[in-house]
Image (cartoon, grey):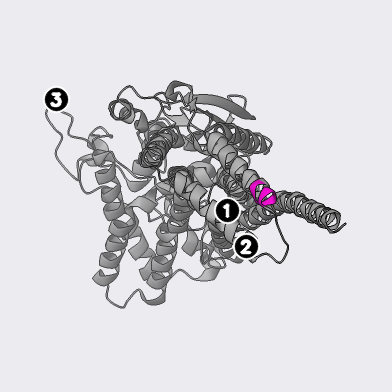
């Protein structure tokens, strides 16, 4: 039997086991006969109260029709007859990914019960104990209808075009952090020894607008200095070229010419680390040198860690793979793309970074004034911003969480629906009307899988359309991605809200509409059968009346 998600591989087996058990209770206790008794009594009462005279033969015909329909519903839609083999319960997963040639491709993977490539496979032993050698069974009608509904849903999902999964990429980037303790400690040292003193110096100097390079005018400098890789601090004389580490940095060997003023030269064979300038510490080479040892720079080492450990591109649809595919033509240079990746990672250190900023501001009292406010606001915008790629880390995680939870909710609803089917059919007197309504209701729930896929597709489509204007312009892209700093950032948050509603309201609205249609369709089918039955019984009653009149006239003669 096909299913619509990984978790459904297990909930489907459980649901049909419970269905079989509940039906067994109804059958063994004789409760399934109660609807038949109620139907017989109801038909007799309706016939008695009917304005049309119905003969005993007509009454029997009406009862036959009702009982035959009920028996048919019991045999085909209630009595479990077909085995649901767990080993043949499968889920066909369609995923878009990026190939080595940087092209999009759709892959199909068939997952099975016990081999879903997830942690749920650990529950296979529990399910085996629960089954205790039994095989779940399903009624003929529901077995066939379930396969048909899943086939329709999967076909519809497969027809959706392949596109970059920007939401998954953004959510993955928003959760980046530095798990390497040594690297994280070095980042704190860099903030303390380099960025914070440079920011405080900038605040004290209050450089006039006319003395700033053209690219940093109009307030652009405040956006640039909000992170440790500030181009202004790196290239401006008197900042990173003179500031230096206060403690030895293991990545840089001791150089007597450079470090003798900080510490005595260690014994031969002992490497205690050196004291590089902030320029050399960040880029790997001094301001007056060339890039011979850039791999020693903190920026390069952090990038290596992020790309290899934090977001590896080990699969076609991983965060790293999507980032490489998307960022390739969205930044002016590869360096801009790498800088964006580093800024995203700094989001995880937001609380500690803000603490450093607060301490730096208090050291100089009110001297820094509005300049410090600019720096603080800019930095908080950076670290409070949405994983850089989705307009807000919190909203990104919320939307991604809804996306991950949606199939789980669907599987649980299907589980409850299937378990309750015997009771719903019995309470509905095994009527054709209820069976049709429940069939459409099941289809609507299974079709949620396509609605969820459509919501994800529309979300990525809207995001890609919104960000298309940032091509080849890293600064515009950063303005676009920062929440509360531009109108576009607000639009990204709006897209997140719309996506959230698509995941929650669209399935409910679809189920409601299909439920109404199912009830009306069931009523039409039932009324058609009842009217034909009543017509036959009425004709039978009329025939009896005519015969009685003929007999009476014969006796009179």
How far across and how far down the image is residue 402, in percent? Answer: 47, 51
How far across and how far down the image is residue 7, in percent? Answer: 43, 37
For marks 3 and 2, give the one nearer the viewer. 2
Q: Secondary structure at mark 1?
A: helix
Residue position marked by numbered label 3 in the rendering: 268
Q: Secondary structure at mark 2?
A: helix
Q: How many C-alpha atoms fall within 10 Å of the one at disc 1: few (<14), some, or many (≥20)?
A: many
Q: Secondary structure at mark 3?
A: loop
* Left or right for 402, reference 354: right
For marks 3 and 1, give the one nearer the viewer. 1
Q: Residue at x 33, y 65 (%)?
A: 200
Q: What is the number of the mark on residue 48?
A: 2
Q: How many C-alpha atoms fall within 10 Å of the one at disc 3: few (<14), some, or many (≥20)?
A: few
Residue position marked by numbered label 1 in the rendering: 507
Q: Is residue 3 above or below residue 114?
A: below
User: Which residue is situated farthest in the right direction here?
Assistant: 557
- Residues at marks 1 and 2, CA–CA distance in whole angstroms: 45 Å
Q: Residue at x 24, y 39 (%)?
A: 182
How far across and how far down the image is residue 222, in percent? Answer: 47, 64
N-terminal-most mark, 3 or 1: 3
- Residues at marks 3 and 1, CA–CA distance in whole angstroms: 72 Å
User: Which residue is situated farthest in the front direction here?
Assistant: 557
Which quarter of the figure is the C terminus placed in? bottom right
Q: Which residues are magenta?
A: 56-60
* Left or right for 311, reference 91: left
- Residues at marks 3 and 2, CA–CA distance in whole angstroms: 113 Å
For marks 1 and 2, give the one nearer the viewer. 2
In front here: 202 or 342? 342
Q: Main secondary structure of the magenta part?
A: helix
């Amino acid at each position: 039997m096909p299913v619509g998600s990984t978790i459904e591989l297990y909930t489907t087996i459980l649901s049909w086991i419970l269905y079989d058990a509940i039906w067994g209770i109804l059958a063994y206790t004789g409760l399934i006969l109660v609807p038949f008794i109620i139907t017989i009594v109801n038909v007799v009462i309706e016939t008695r109260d009917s304005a049309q005279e119905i003969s005993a033969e007509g009454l029997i015909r009406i009862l036959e029709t009702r009982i035959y329909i009920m028996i048919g519903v019991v045999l085909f839609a209630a009595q479990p007859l077909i085995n649901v083999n767990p080993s043949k319960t499968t889920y066909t997963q369609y995923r878009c990914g990026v190939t080595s040639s940087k092209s999009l491709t759709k892959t199909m993977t068939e997952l099975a019960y016990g081999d879903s490539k997830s942690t749920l496979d650990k529950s296979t032993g529990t399910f085996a104990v629960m089954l205790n050698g039994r095989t779940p069974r399903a009624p003929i009608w529901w077995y066939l209808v379930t396969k048909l509904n899943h086939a329709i849903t999967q076909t519809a999902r497969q027809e959706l075009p392949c596109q970059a999964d920007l939401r998954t990429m953004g959510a993955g980037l928003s959760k980046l952090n530095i798990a390497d303790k040594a690297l994280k400690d070095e980042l704190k040292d860099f903030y303390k020894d380099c960025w914070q003193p440079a920011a405080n110096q900038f605040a004290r100097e209050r450089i006039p607008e006319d003395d700033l390079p053209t690219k940093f005018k109009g307030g652009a400098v405040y956006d640039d200095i909000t992170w440790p890789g500030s181009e202004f601090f790196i290239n401006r004389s008197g900042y990173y070229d003179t500031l230096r580490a206060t403690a030895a940095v293991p990545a840089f060997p001791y150089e007597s010419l450079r470090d003798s003023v900080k510490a005595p030269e260690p014994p031969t064979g002992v490497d205690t680390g050196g004291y590089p300038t902030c320029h050399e510490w960040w880029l790997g080479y001094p301001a007056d040198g060339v890039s011979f040892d850039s791999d020693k720079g903190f920026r390069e080492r952090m990038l290596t860690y992020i790309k290899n450990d934090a977001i590896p591109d080990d699969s076609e649809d991983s965060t790293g793979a999507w980032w490489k595919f998307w960022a390739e033509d969205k930044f002016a240079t590869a360096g801009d793309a790498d800088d964006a990746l580093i800024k995203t990672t700094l989001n995880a250190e937001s609380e500690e970074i803000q603490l450093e900023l607060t301490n730096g501001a208090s050291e100089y009292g009110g001297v820094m004034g509005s300049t410090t406010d600019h720096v603080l606001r800019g930095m908080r915008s950076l670290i409070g911003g949405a994983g850089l790629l989705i307009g807000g880390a919190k909203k990104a995680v919320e939307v991604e969480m809804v996306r991950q939870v949606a199939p789980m909710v669907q599987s649980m609803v299907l589980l409850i629906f299937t378990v309750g089917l015997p009771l719903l059919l019995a309470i509905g007197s095994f009527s054709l009307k209820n069976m049709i309504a429940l069939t459409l209701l099941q289809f609507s729930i299974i079709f949620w899988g396509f609605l969820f896929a459509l919501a994800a597709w529309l979300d990525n489509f809207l995001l890609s359309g919104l960000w298309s204007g940032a091509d080849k312009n890293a600064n515009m892209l950063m303005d676009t991605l920062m929440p509360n700093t531009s109108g576009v950032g607000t639009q990204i948050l709006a897209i997140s809200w719309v996506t959230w509603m698509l995941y929650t309201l669209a399935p409910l609205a679809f189920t409601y509409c299909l439920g109404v249609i199912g009830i009306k369709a069931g009523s039409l089918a039932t009324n058609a059968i009842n009217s034909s039955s009543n017509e036959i019984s009425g004709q039978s009653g009329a025939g009896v009346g005519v015969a009685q009149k003929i007999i009476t006239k014969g006796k009179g003669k």
